[in-house]
Image: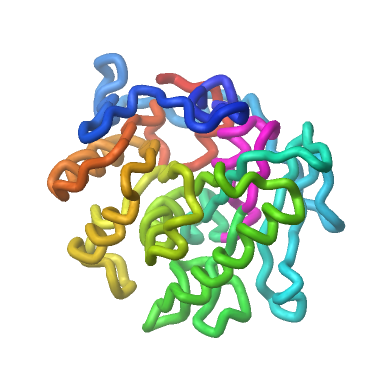
Amino acid sequence: MGARWWRMLDPAGWPVQVGAVKGSFCLLACSLIGGVAAAQLPDLSTVDADLRIPRLTAGEPAPGKRVKHRLPTHARTKVYHVLYLPSDWEPGRKYPVLVEYAGNKWGATSSGTPEGSRLGYGISGGKGFLWLCLPYLNGDGTANVSQWWGSKPAYDPQPTIDYCLEAVPWVCENFGGDRGRVVLCGFSRGAIACNFIGLHNDRIARLWKAFVPYSHYDGVVTGWPYPGVDRPAARERLRRLAGRPQFICGEGKNAEQTADYLDKTGVEGDFTIRGTGFRNHDDAWVLRPSLV
């Protein structure tokens, strides 16, 4: 996909709107791409990637490097995030920030870890944006988890929320992130986290300028194992969006189902909803030329 596809993310002046209409849905139905049924959508394997995510390295953040990184307050824990400074990063400049949450651990598609994330690099093409991949923490806040957030059976999101509230301002302050241009994105579990974590309370909701949830959405499915999965709770989180834009995308009929859910909530918003053009539940699509 790369920066060619993602025209609404303009580092020079976020946000540049693409088809998002207040109170309505700009929907390119995922089930139909140019008249082709969802079952006939192409597989990722048929389209070569045109972006390669830099390998994860040790050491301090530097332009073009993707590093495993820790907050000073968590130096003696197993908690870490992954930080990428764009190849055009310069000290003293301000950059918009893409904050990303990963999907659950799921076969070869998702490792469930910060380093397994791909959306931020595909959106930015590796230039013009800080890319911060945040962890989900266990119930004690001492280690990352690869399934949901917190620890069974409570699935307490608070340690994950607290880490986010500390990490985003710290990274912005130390690496030139623009606090006024922070975008939250995520795949699968991470797409749900855009609202479930990112809009969990008024304090964390204030961090974000916009959202990019890919494949799943808070409130659409109510059978997940964590407390607060019900639709009244999801609707309350959605209200904290307060008119900020969301670019919602999914494979197959996924985004179509999200559009139907949002329409039924009665919550007006600036939603752009599109299909990826692929059949796969896999964030590697974002590293390929767009088919839509």
Nearer to the camera, 126 or 292: 126
Q: Position of residue 27 (x, y in %)?
A: 26, 28
**Which residue lies most toward the right here?**
59
Q: Quadrant of the N terminus?
A: top right
Magenta range is: 113-132
Q: Position of residue 263 (x, y in %)?
A: 16, 41
Q: Position of residue 216 (x, y in %)?
A: 34, 49
Nearer to the camera, 197 or 11: 11
- 216 vs 41: above or below: below
**Residue 77 located left or right of residue 152:** right
- 199 vs 63: above or below: below
**Residue 129 located left or right of residue 284:** right
Q: Is residue 184 magenta?
A: no
Nearer to the camera, 205 or 56: 205
Residue at left offset 29%, top offset 54%: 238
**Residue 223 located left or right of residue 123:** left
Residue at left offset 68%, top offset 52%: 172
Residue at left offset 70%, top offset 40%: 94
- 15 vs 168: above or below: above
